[in-house]
Amino acid sequence: MRASFIHIADTHLGYEQYGLRERFNDFSRSFWKIIDDAIDRKIDFMIIAGDLFNKRAIAAQTLIHAIEGLKRLKEHNIPVITIEGNHDRSYYRDGISWLQFLCYQGYIILLAPIMQEGAPLITPWNSENMLGSYVNLIGGKVRLYGLPWQGAAITRSLEGMAQALHVHKPYELEGWIYNPGSPETCSVEEIQWDDRGYYYVEIDTDQSEFLIDPMQKACRHRASRIRTQRRPFLRHELRIDGLEDPQALYARLSEYCQREGKKYTGTKERPLVQISITGTLSFDPGALNQSYMEEMLHEAFQPLHVRIDNNTNDRDYVPDDGDLDGRDRSVWHELERHVFEELVGFDARYLPAKEQWGAVLSELKQQALDEEKPEKIAQFLREKRAALLPPT
């Protein structure tokens, strides 16, 4: 007996990532391209191992895109065997999922075993009630078993293996357990798994030497992982330790843009770009101009979407009080000025005149306590900034 099939999972149709309609289309296009390959290879069946959809309550357009692909497989007499993932399952109050709807319409075979005392019964799939743990294909020569997402129970069933394996990460175990990963990038963490996609599997029990791996002489199947074409997804960690002002940070970001941006000039698919700013700040985080940084990235990459995450740490403040004793009320004003000076000194822009800035902050506080008019306080701060900060 010879047969072939394609194994996919986690297509997440309907995922409008970052609220972008184009990302919604990306996930559909990825699904359709796999279907094109399935038809070209003239496979015997397709397996969808959970999470065809991104969420339980799907939009009409998502259903249309799913049917558009599944209908082509049906027209070529390629059965689709599916299980429910945690994203596919119906709400308890609804009682029926969209996968069950597709099964009812004849687009898929949805394996859902009858449960008895918490354990699945090993019974054949019944088209009338759409229940059963396995289905026979190719004249009964191939049997497929399926179990929907079990949540916490899967950990007990697989003896902890579920905790060790990420569902969107591709992996193989001992030539018998395979997971293709997600065809499209569902989260930024997935970009480290560049070989995600789907499996094309060939079975040959008559002339197994055609498929035999020298390292596994009893093997009668060959699973080829096929990497899907995905939209570029860039992630960069921008470290800011030692940078004394925002301009130095912008310069470092500009270096990255000039180095990497040219790789994406004129590319068909506009990339998604995420910058993670990390390290310990030497200046006030409020001084960072996020819009300016986003403009730099847009100019360099022409991206579909930009995201900047500020994961920096503030410098820890340990007061150096010297001989000042906070229990003595007579030195409180002097102690307060000292604390202001130390805090201001953390920002390299204010460090050369931290004593003067400490006095300015003390005066601002006193004006606020005296309920001075905001306009007067603002004018006082403008005059001090003009006097103490070098012109830019």
Image (cartoon, helix red, strand yellow):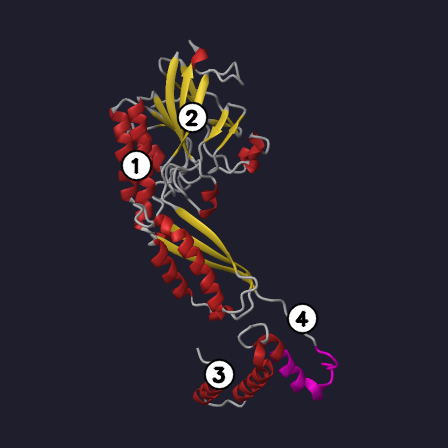
How many residues crowd around disc 4 within 10 Å: few (fewer than 14), some, or many (20 or more)? few
Q: Quadrant of the N terminus?
A: top left
User: How far is mark 1 from mark 4, CA to CA?
Assistant: 59 Å
Task: Classify residue 346 as left or right of residue 323.
Answer: left
Does label 2 or label 4 sit earlier along the sequence? 2
Identify the amino acid type marked 2. Answer: Ser
Which residue shows up at 49% across the image and 16% down it?
A: 219
Badge 2 is on which residue?
A: 224
How many residues crowd around disc 1 within 10 Å: few (fewer than 14), some, or many (20 or more)? many
Badge 3 is on which residue?
A: 385
Badge 1 is on which residue?
A: 66
Identify the amino acid type marked 3. Answer: Arg
In this rendering, is residue 180 above or below 3? below
Q: What is the span of residues highlighted in magenta in the rendered image?
A: 321-340
User: How far is mark 3 from mark 2, CA to CA?
Assistant: 66 Å
Which residue shows up at 44% across the image and 16% down it?
A: 211
The part of the image, by quadrant, that contains residue 143 is top left
Identify the amino acid type marked 4. Answer: Val
Task: Classify residue 293 as left or right of residue 340.
Answer: left
Residue 378: x and y, percent? 45, 85
**Which label is found at residue 318?**
4
Q: Secondary structure at mark 3?
A: helix
Residue 156 versus residue 183: which sits nearer the camera?
Answer: 183
User: How far is mark 3 from mark 1, CA to CA?
Assistant: 61 Å
The part of the image, by quadrant, that contains residue 203 is top left
